[in-house]
Image (cartoon, rainbow, N blue to C red):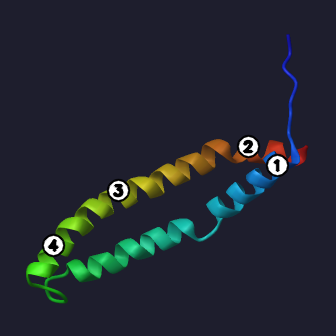
């Protein structure tokens, strides 16, 4: 038994927004945030107790942000054809 396809206008709108977000500056903005945090982690630029606290938080955040960028790219690659299919209806 074949399954029918339902693509509502709301589905198309969501697919368009997802495609725009994933092809937009989101990944670059995350990478820019990581680069700027790296500047503050440099002991020649910022040091002391507050800098040490920032460094701890920044290390944790950097790992999470790196995984986020990777996940976004995988999501974009895996869903690209699906988004295109939705937009064709």
Q: Secondary structure at mark 4?
A: helix
The alpha-carbon separation of the residues under discs 1 and 4 comes to 45 Å
Reading the image, the residue beneath label 4 is 53
Q: Which residue is mark 3?
A: 64
Q: Quadrant of residue 65?
A: bottom left
* Residue located at (82% from left, 49% from top): 10
Residue extending furthest toward the top: 1
Tell which circle, 1 or 4, labels the residue nearer the N-terminal end: 1
Relative to residue 38, is residue 70 drawn left or right?
right
Q: CA distance from mark 1 to mark 3?
A: 32 Å
Which one is closest to the eye, mark 3 or mark 4?
Answer: 4
Question: Of helix, strand and loop, which one carries label 2?
Answer: helix
Which residue of the protein is positioned furthest toward the left in this rendering?
Answer: 49
Horizontally, residue 54 falls left or right of residue 71, namely left
The residue that label 1 is drawn on is 10
Q: Separation of disc 2 and disc 1 at Cα?
A: 18 Å
Point out residue 26 in the picture as x, y percentages from the top left corner. Answer: 55, 67
Name the image quarter holding the N terminus.
Answer: top right
Q: Position of residue 32 (x, y in %)?
A: 43, 76
First reached walking from the N terminus: tag 2 or tag 1: 1
Looking at the rendered structure, which numbered label has been put on residue 81?
2
Q: Nearer the viewer, mark 2 or mark 3?
A: 3
Circle nearer the N terminus (1, 3): 1
């Amino acid at each position: 038994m074949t399954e029918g396809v339902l693509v509502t206008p709301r589905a198309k709108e969501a697919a368009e927004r997802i495609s725009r977000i994933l092809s937009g500056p989101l990944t670059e903005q995350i990478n820019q945030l990581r680069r700027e945090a790296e500047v503050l982690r440099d002991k020649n630029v910022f040091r002391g107790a507050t800098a040490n606290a920032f460094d701890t938080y920044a290390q944790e955040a950097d790992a999470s942000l790196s995984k986020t960028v990777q996940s976004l790219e995988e999501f974009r690659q895996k869903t690209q054809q699906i988004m295109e299919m939705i937009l064709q209806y």
